[in-house]
Amino acid sequence: MNKKGIRYLRFSSKGQSNSSIEAQEMYTSRWFETNKVELTDTFIDAGFSAKTFDRPDMNELTAFIAKHYKSCDYLVVSEMDRFSRDAGEAISLIKKLQLKYSVQIVSVTEGITYDYRDSGSFFRTGLSFLLAEDDNIRRANKINSGIYTAKAQEGRFIGAKAPYGYSVDGKGKARKLVINETEAIIVRFIYDSYLTKMPIYMIKSKAIEMGMKLGSKCIIQDMLENPIYSGQQNVKSWRTLPGGIFPAKHEPVIDMLTWQRVQEKLNGKDPKTLTLIRDEFPLRGILLCHCGLTVTGAPSKGRLKWYNYYKCKKSTGHLNVGTIKAHSQLREMLRLMSPSNHYVIALEERSKAALATAMEENKKLIVIHKEELGKVEKKLASVERKWIDDQLTFESYHRNTKDLTQQRIFIKAKIDELNADDKEAYILLYGNIKKLTDMVKIYECANTIEKQELIRMVFDSKLYYQAGSYRTPYIMNIFSHNLLEMKEKKLLILDEKAGSLERTRLGGE
């Protein structure tokens, strides 16, 4: 009775040339002819690592043997490392195939027919697998060591694809990230919008409108957490060498201060406090019930149509007011809050003086920060000299360099921010202060996020609604000139017991 066998061919990359498979087919076919063994089936495993047996074609192969082992004598491979690079798992599987199914493994190019009961065969096969695994470990060590050196010590970008907002330029060690300004505008919008409390789902929608292609469901979250945009990058630890966020050589899309503020907000965010933003309910999530809980907004069915209401999460005896009434009262309240032109002119003069004083303080701060920067630069140079002179271990050198580089980036960002304040502050003052005479127009021209931020700022997040009127323990002084009239019209009542709302809110929570 003729012996029968199956063969197993594999290559590790789907993009690899067919020459590897053709060579394996040639060697194994010759073995079948020479040994007069009938080839019954062939399994080809493409694109999966040999580090594990959990591979689709390997699973099919073992299932085939379990079913047809009575008509199968040999499993033929071109060489053992084509079968597996994990010595322990490979020997265990081969032992099982021989003892349970009486199927022997043949390595054609190495001239091994594995026989578990023969000590010489066992030794040669085990050695073959161990050498393959050793080669795999050394290759992985070399790759991982190179990646760590390139990213942690040289600050180079290693990824195959540039992050959104960047393009890749150059090859080899000259390869680097360069800012794609068209995409970078969207990245800066994402960071700025997040700091202005715009919900992530709305940021994503706006970014797509601006031209960003839809990626993963968490694309905005991933971008906000990615240090690459601040001129840094994540580095995995390697053996005893530490991992973490390291300085990179590419130009940042956003400044370090913005990055740090976003991370602080991300780390301190409570998902339970997130509020769905809808234009029909601009006060949802910021207006309070008398109990201290923020109100929600929802439509309610009337006799003929649906009506929108602001409601407290508690039902009986708590806030339930229609948006038409609430918004009408708010607009009239904003009209009465609008300061006169005479007052705004006087405020502008006082603001100029205050701004000039602030600018002088900024100049003093810039001098202080530049002195700090000089000290940090000297420390960095000292660490470099000690490293060159073998006075520091790599761990100490890396730790000191990382800390000092972070300090340098932070101080430079502070200096840039203080330098930018002069121009930006004057533009904001002269371009916007006269608009204060029409608070209704300011409110109605704003988007929902801006409307909410305006209400928070004017009332210090303490505006609540009770007994048909808005109430607050605090209002900015510039808007408090018509409080008596607003009280008479039952629009806004200033709570004389300042602080009572905070106590009520704590009790409500």
Image (spheres, rainbow, N blue to C red):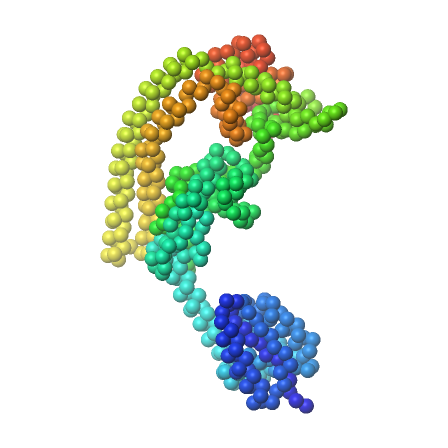
Q: Residue at x 64, y 81 (%)?
A: 40
Is residue 506 toward the left or the right of residue 298 in the image? left
Taking the image as shown, residue 2 lies to the left or right of residue 364, namely: right
Q: Is residue 491 visible?
A: yes
Whole-percent x and y of residue 337?
50, 15
- Quadrant containing the N terminus is bottom right
Q: Residue 86: image x %, image y %?
A: 52, 71
Q: Residue lying farthest right?
A: 303
Q: Which residue is at 32% across, 49% downward? A: 401
Quarter that holds the C terminus:
top right
Q: Nearer the viewer, residue 494 or 305?
A: 305
Q: Quadrant of residue 435?
A: top left
Residue 480: image location, x then y, percent: 48, 14
Query: Which quadrant of the structure image shows residue 296?
Result: top right
Question: Where 259 falls versus 138 (above or below)?
Answer: above
Query: Viewer-proximal residue, 21 or 211?
Result: 211
- Name the quadrant containing residue 42: bottom right
Q: Is residue 206 above or below residue 448?
A: below
Q: Is residue 246 visible?
A: no
Of residue 435 and residue 255, the one placed in the foreground of this image is 435
User: What's the residue at 38%, 23% (across, down)?
Assistant: 429
Q: Would you say 108 lies left or right of 290 here?
A: left
